[in-house]
Image (cartoon, rainbow, N blue to C red):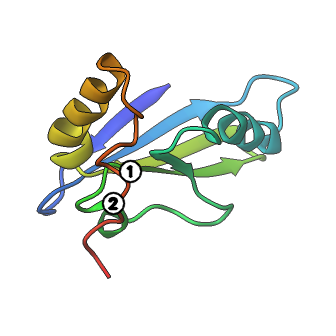
């Protein structure tokens, strides 16, 4: 697995690309199914539809993480692209989410709002 955080001229966002090899007998569809099954109940993580890659503007000002999945069956490579707002999800929003959990408050309290980009 290769993890690459990208340095780009963005005001607030962390964009990462993760490259991995498919294990023998595992299909690209199984990768997506596994990610969707794992994160479908997580309020702040969205596995995007097939063919859709995340944009930093979609998470700007939100507590969301967006994950795009691309699988090249021929080369047996998986590419995951993720993006989050490094202020909200990366620091302040994550602190609120953790405090909510520590105090027994609903995890999403004060954090269910869309990003700032229209």
Position in image of residue 100 (x %, y %): 31, 29
Circles 2, 1 touching at the beta carbon (< 8 Å)? yes
Label whose residue precedes the other's in the sequence (2 or 1): 2
In percent of width and height, residue 50 lies at 68, 61
Q: Mark 2 highlights which residue?
A: 59
Q: Residue at x 28, y 48 (%)?
A: 110
Residue 6 in view of the camera? no
Instruction: State the SS at label 2.
Output: helix
Q: Residue at x 71, y 30 (%)?
A: 22
* In-image side of 23 versus 35 (left or right): right
Is 86 left or right of 4, judged from the image as shown?
Answer: left
Q: Which residue is mark 1?
A: 64
Q: Nearer the viewer, residue 78 or 113?
A: 113
Q: Is residue 58 above or below residue 93?
A: below
Q: Is residue 69 visible?
A: yes
Q: Secondary structure at mark 1?
A: loop
Q: Nearer the viewer, residue 26 or 56?
A: 56
Up-down relation of residue 116 to residue 72 (above or below): below
To which quarter of the image does residue 26 belong?
A: top right
Label 1 environment density (alpha carbons within 10 Å; few <14, some 14–19, many ≥20): many
């Amino acid at each position: 697995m290769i993890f690459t955080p990208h340095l780009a001229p963005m005001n607030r966002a962390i964009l990462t690309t993760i490259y991995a090899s498919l294990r023998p007998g595992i299909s690209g569809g199984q990768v997506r199914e596994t990610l969707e099954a794992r994160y479908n109940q997580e309020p702040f993580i969205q596995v995007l539809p097939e063919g859709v890659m995340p944009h930093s503007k979609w998470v700007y000002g939100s507590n969301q993480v967006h994950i795009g999945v691309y699988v090249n069956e021929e080369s047996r490579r998986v590419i995951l692209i993720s993006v989050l707002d490094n202020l909200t999800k990366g620091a302040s929003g994550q602190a609120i989410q953790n405090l909510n959990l520590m105090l027994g408050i609903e995890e999403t309290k004060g954090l269910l709002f869309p990003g700032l980009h229209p």
